[in-house]
Amino acid sequence: MEKISRTKVVDVLKCTDFGAVVNVKGWVRTHRSSKAVDFIALNDGSTIKNVQVVVDPAKFDENTLKQITTGACISVNGELVESQGAGQTVEIQCREIEVYGLCGSDYPMQKKGQSFEYMRQYAHMRLRTNTFGAVMRIRHNMAIAIHRYFHEHGFFYFHTPLITASDCEGAGQMFQVTTKNLYDLKKDDEGKIIYDDDFFGKQASLTVSGQLEGELGATALGAIYTFGPTFRAENSNTPRHLAEFWMIEPEVAFIDLNGLMDLEEDFIKYCVQWALDKCQDDLEFLNKMVDKTLIERLKSVVADSFVRLPYTEGIRILEEAVAGGRKFEFPVSWGMDLASEHERYLVEEHFRKPVIMTDYPKEIKAFYMKINEDGRTVQGTDVLFPQIGEIIGGSVREENYDKLMGEIEERNIPMKDMWWYLDTRKYGTCPHGGFGLGFERLILFVTGMQNIRDVIPFPRTPKTAEF
Ligand code: 4AD
Ligand code: MG
């Protein structure tokens, strides 16, 4: 076969250099044969769109053509011609074909319209489908948007450790990291495991959040953000939870509650607008195949102002709804942690737009949140989104040493692990705040996908760590 440098499908489809001979390589999506002509739809992952390869069967070996089935990988040299078919501008009149890899009829992505549950069993192969291609390209674009946003706004990308000895959220949901022989654990007289001889000389775990170290960065560099994997051993088998997920955590010095909410809203809108601008083809595909209201919903999130709602007011609205006959699985009362059904009622039924909820009872929030004058609520902010529920969790931080110590003691958080964190409050403490955006929850929202396992290439959830 003649050697011609490869053109990606995304570029070939934009090309109008008719008559030129090009090379494309990719995986066969469909192959339709007839006596007079064969059509091969070829995709190389660079775009949701396929390029159509038109083959004159008289010019090729019949058996070779027969072998080119869905999933096979081929390289094609051919002439770029204007397309006669609807919905495409160019196609390739095939001159030569090289088969790189055949694909047997047991190829798990053979059939169209398989359920997402089915495809999850083949997470290593589902990437080659239209839907997962679209989701992964959007995921990439969102990562770029996030870095762009913070870079343009003067935030520094700050790398916080993945291995840590402190539980930021205090929820006790950490995966341990150890080199100890688990079959022969040394224990003290009380039966507690001795960690002195472990790799780090103490009990260590995978981080649930980079925030604590992020605060050290922000109180030196002014504004930072982290963007990395976080790990939570919460046994939540829901379409919104992963054991390994990516989180973006900006942290800013001298920001107050209103400033924080402005940042949250501006940041999310920037990311959604980026998707609308840069991922048109993929969004149109998902809008057609997965969720017919997707693009409309994305546009409305960018256009509308988010509602800013104190927790107490939110509870009042929910109580009114209950009085009016609305049924919830979990009862509503001041002091409770909102369940997803409550969050979604507020966002999808009551306000019909995103809600930033603030000023939660301190008992249901983490130790580091700034305590309000009333002594019972804290300056936490959760951003609640249609279809998703909580997409962001953040707060203004308690910068007063004594108040923070009070919380640490009240919650029995081991002090000796926290000394370095407390030093921020001891030496030149400053008002500051930040938040965490769950990356996969953002991707769920932007793609219209229903299950968080379908917006990360290889999901980690209770009892699954395949691939
Ligand atoms: O609300 P969370 O627990 O907040 C924190 O971790 C803070 N330290 C953030 C900060 O202020 N710097 O988590 C933040 C977000 C949630 O709103 C949610 O979007 C996502 O992380 N998240 C999860 N996403 C997928 N799977 C899980 N198990 C998640 N847990 C939280
Ligand atoms: Mg939260």
Image (cartoon, grey):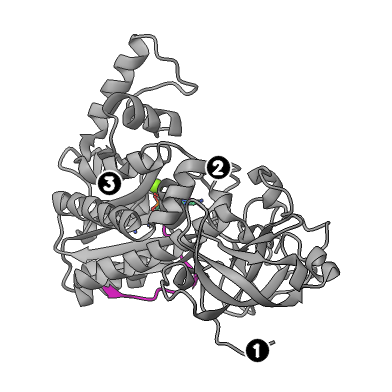
Mark 1 highlights which residue?
Answer: 2
Q: Where, quadrant-wise, is the N terminus in this rendering?
A: bottom right
Looking at numbered disc 1 in the image, what kind of residue is underneath it? Glu
Whichever of callouts 1 and 2 sits on the residue coming sooner in the sequence is: 1
Residue nearest the observer in this picture, 38 or 220: 38
Q: Give the residue drawn at x 78%, y 67%.
A: 65
Q: Given the image, on which type of amino acid does mark 2 rest? A: Pro
Which mark lies nearer to you, 1 or 3? 1
Find residue 223 and report its horizontal and vertical position in percent. 22, 70
Q: In front: 292, or 369?
A: 292
Give percent across and percent down for residue 358: 24, 40
Q: Which quarter shows the C terminus?
A: bottom right
Q: Which residue lies under the disc numbered 3?
A: 380
- Labels 1, 2: front one: 1
Sequence-wise, the earlier of marks 1 and 3 is: 1
Residue, disc 2: 239
- Specify the segment rendered in magenta: 156-171
* Front-most of residues 139 and 85: 85
Residue 68 lies, in percent from the top left, at 76, 65
Amino acid type of the residue that numbered disc 3 sits on in the rendered structure: Gly
Residue 392 is situated, as x and y percent measured from the top left of the image, at 35, 49
10 Å crowding of disc 3: few (<14), some (14-19), many (20+): many
| Residue 162 highlighted magenta (yes or no) | yes
Residue 89, quarter of picture? bottom left
Q: Mark 1 and 2 residues: CB-CB less than 8 Å, in contact? A: no
Whether residue 100 is visible: yes
Judge whether 154 appears above or below 350 on screen.
below
Q: Residue at x 18, y 43 (%)?
A: 372
Closer to the camera: disc 2 or disc 3? Answer: 2
Vertical order, 79 against 169 (above or below): below
273 left or right of 34?
left
Residue at the (22%, 35%) spot, across then down: 310
